[in-house]
Image: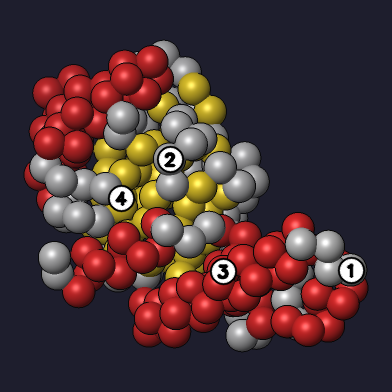
Amino acid sequence: MTEENDLSTRLESCYTGVIHDVMRKMGLNNFVLPYNIQPLLPDRSLAGPVFTVSGHVDETLDDHQTYIEWTGFLSKAKFDHVVVCQPNDISMAHMGELSAETLNARGVRGYIVDGGCRDVSFIAKLGFRVYCRYFTPLDIVGSWAPDGFDVPIRIGDVPINPGDYICADRDGVCVIPQNQVDEITARAEADMQTEDKVRSAILQGVDPQEAYLKYRKF
């Protein structure tokens, strides 16, 4: 297991609530994606380094050119990364069953898009982790193309850079700066251990305020 893969595994064992609390205490802000970006598979968390994609609406494209552009993106997506896409569009599906199966087979950890998805039942059955805003059968053929890979993007108020990390679960998506991910992960793991002590104390009958004062965590 590579160091990068090990870090992704550790982050997936955390949860976004504790990641949020750690980052807030560190004085960070604008790191939680909009609440309406939701998981297709709510019971499966997702974490890993980011590979970014940007795109735009272009209704001058023909079918062939669309497929060339889209399959070019699928070829570029990095192994063991989370693809994060800013499509600059809120009408079409920017992920579908065959594309999800392709990314999954190429070792991509998951896909987060500030846009739509279709073929949802097929993707859920496949088990590929997708987060999106909405579902629609309307696809991108003749209407949309990617235009940037591994470039800075923004979703809502959140800047996302290539190599940043994602921690995502049923509660939402946190973006973790690359140069702070080791510290944030370690702090989150420590806080989770402290939370277990608080929980254990309360279940054993300790007053919740006493438990908080003892461990300074709740």
* Comes first in the chain, label 3 or label 1: 3
* Comes first in the chain, label 3 or label 2: 2
Marks 3 and 1 in Cβ contact (< 8 Å): no
> Mark 3: which secondary structure?
helix
Give the foreground label among 3 and 1.
Answer: 1
Which residue is located at x 15 percent, y 53 percent? 79
* Comes first in the chain, label 4 or label 3: 4
The residue closer to the viewer here, 8 or 190, is 190
Which residue is located at x 21 percent, y 47 percent? 108
Residue beneath disc 2: 44
Residue beneath disc 4: 83
The answer for how far apart the CA atoms under marks 3 and 1 are is: 20 Å
Give the foreground label among 4 and 3.
Answer: 3
* Residue 73 location (% of width, % of height): 18, 44
The image shows a total of numbered marks equal to 4
Marks 1 and 2 in Cβ contact (< 8 Å): no
Residue 207 — which label? 1
Marks 3 and 2 in Cβ contact (< 8 Å): no
- The quadrant of the image that shows the N terminus is bottom left
Which residue is located at x 40 percent, y 20 percent? 120
Residue 81 horizontal side relative to residue 56, left or right: left
In the rendered view, tell whether residue 172 sits above or below residue 204: above
In the rendered view, tell whether residue 44 sits above or below residue 124: below
Marks 2 and 4 in Cβ contact (< 8 Å): no
Give the foreground label among 3 and 2.
Answer: 3
Residue 154 horizontal side relative to residue 211, left or right: left
Kind of residue at disc 3: Met
The answer for how far apart the CA atoms under marks 2 and 4 are is: 16 Å
Residue 192 — which label? 3
Kind of residue at disc 4: Val
Q: Is residue 97 visible?
A: yes
